Image (tube, coloured by chain):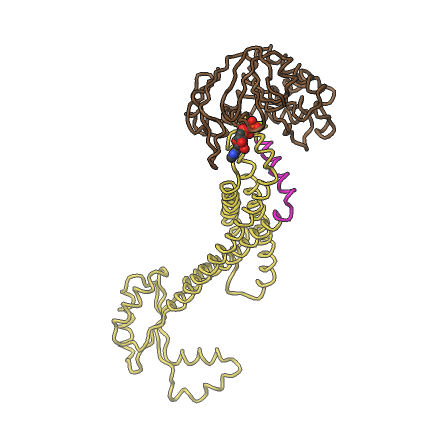
Amino acid sequence: MKIRTFNYFFKESFKSIKRNRVMSFASVTTVAAALFIFGVFMIIISNVNSLVDTVENKVEIKAFLKDDISSLKVRDIEKEIKAISGVKNVTYESKDEALKKVSEQLGENKDLTEGLEEDNPFPASFIIKVNKPSDVSYVSKELSKIQDFEKINDAQEIVNQIIKITNFIKLFSLILMIILSVIGISLISNTIKLTVYARKREISIMKYIGATDWFVKWPFLLEGIMLGLLGALIAIGFLSAGYSYGMKMVSPNILFFSFVPLKTIFQSILWQFLLVGMFIGGFGSLISIRKFLVL
Amino acid sequence: MIEFKNISKVYKNNHIALSNISLSINKGEFVFLVGPSGAGKSTFIKLLLKEIEPTSGDITVNGVNIKKLKRKEVPYYRRNIGIVFQDFRLLQEMTVFENVAFAMQVVEAGHKDIKRKVPQMLSLVGLSSKANMYPHQLSGGEQQRVVLARALSNNPGILICDEPTGNLDPETAWGIMDLLNDINKSGTTILMATHAKDIVDRMKKRVVAIEKGVIVRDQQRGVYGYED
Ligand SMILES: Nc1ncnc2c1ncn2[C@@H]1O[C@H](COP(=O)(O)OP(=O)(O)O)[C@@H](O)[C@H]1O
Ligand SMILES: [Mg+2]
């Protein structure tokens, strides 16, 4: 394709966008809204994922011993635990230590535990650290084979819960994005329809002169693609600004978790969004080209 | 060069616009297609442009049966045919120069070619001084000259005119006819549909008369032959 021809396509597309300002604005806004909402959820998900990683990395298994285990037996059990593959280290916490820990955690209300020394209700336990998060379930299973444990706690449940919530958010945002994309496609298709009608005469002349079908179609396709891209760029702009502002507001209040950096988010959404924007725009204009452009 | 063989055209409403027409036009000829309104002249032209398909028969142009042209090939076929309409069909938001340049742009001519060719065309039709005016600033005759410049800008071998003088006063019409005569003399085949008796009678060219979809007369150096 000649550069001059391409220039002509661009000029035509810009002219049409200006001519259909109102519809163009509505299309761009819808595409931007669709992608913005999707982006918000993507940001939430990627932060939740990073939170899951943090939780999983801190994963330790706490195995509570039954009440009447002798200290000799305790040493045997410790050896047995250490023999399980995937176990990094094992710490024993006696009944006394457990009570002390609880009263420390209670702080000002520590007097609540006073007098409990006689009949300590807190069980002794082993705190087991594993090599990698994926070792948790195997180690847990092996631990449950040891008869001397009352109860075994691992973080698997919390992690599973978080994954469930993330999946729900993913599904919800996907559905919302699809709905908004469909609206975006139909608005763009309507915008292109207006252009088709506005240029009817010109197109009929072009056909008589010997313009190829694609020469006629390109400016329409380009107009749709530009509208979609513009929507994507606006969404990216708002997301970036919103996210960095949000991080600044929230970060000081949360200590245990650091947000996924803007740059990482930006890198992953930039191309996806531009492609999705182009797709929405291109698809919208193709619909109108097929339906209304009589060549 | 142009050959219609047993061409019939029946429109969707069962109206028979042309019935079993055979006609052949040689390279370099100037042919008037005459006949009353509704005779089938425009149908003939639309068939030649492959804007509509014949119900039966074959049309051969430059040795190619145009029925067999693929959709993709049609634009390239049309580039060999210049077309002039009664109602001009200029783009109002473009200047005279741009209207002619547009035709070359559409067939993806080079920038340099366009810059060289457009002034040549405007000078040929005598509009060099009005290159930067808009169609609405021109008289009917001047507008039709722009259309001629546009139609000829891609060097078509055939020029088709559907009632090109229909909207012009007689004097202006004669100006256009002189121009067409010159264009024909330089080698372009011309087919002109008209019901302008004066013009046909005075030009003394080949006249093909159609009535109710049938060729009733084909005469070299002919006359219009109807009382309008
Ligand atoms: N698209 C169409 N559908 C139905 N009838 C048509 C159509 N176009 C032309 N006709 C009819 O065919 C006949 C020939 O029309 P046309 O070729 O335009 O005649 P001319 O150009 O000689 O005036 C007319 O009776 C006209 O009403
Ligand atoms: Mg007609």
What range of the chain is rendered magenta?
Answer: A6-24
From the viewer's perspective, tell me whether residue A25 is left or right of residue A283.
Answer: right
Q: Residue sitting at 72 percent across and 19 percent down?
A: B171
Q: Position of residue B52 (x, y in %)?
A: 49, 30
Q: Magenta region, mostly helix, strand or loop?
A: helix
Vertical order, A162 against A278 (above or below): below
Of residues A67 and B68, the one nearer the viewer is B68
Q: Position of residue A256 (x, y in %)?
A: 50, 65
Residue that appears at 69% across and 24% down: B168
Q: Is residue B69 visible?
A: yes
Residue A98 pos. (x, y %): 40, 78
In the image, the chain rendered in yellow is A
Classify residue A66 by image quadrant. bottom left
Q: In which quarter of the image is ligand 2?
A: top right
Location of residue A132 (image quadrant): bottom left
Q: Which of B17 and B114 is in front in this view?
A: B17
Judge whether residue A129 is colored magenta. no
Please indicate whether residue A34 sits to the left or right of residue A122 in the image: right
Identified at 72% across, 30% down, the residue is B136
Q: How many numbered marks does the figure carry?
A: 0
x%, y% of residue B184? Answer: 59, 13
Residue at the image point whose x is 64% and y is 49% from the top: A22
Vertical side of A210 occupied by A21: above or below? below
Chain identifier, colour brown: B
Give whichever of B65, A142 is nearer the camera. Answer: B65
Visible residue check, residue A295: no
Q: Does the magenta stretch include residue A16?
A: yes
Q: Is residue A102 left or right of residue A194?
A: left
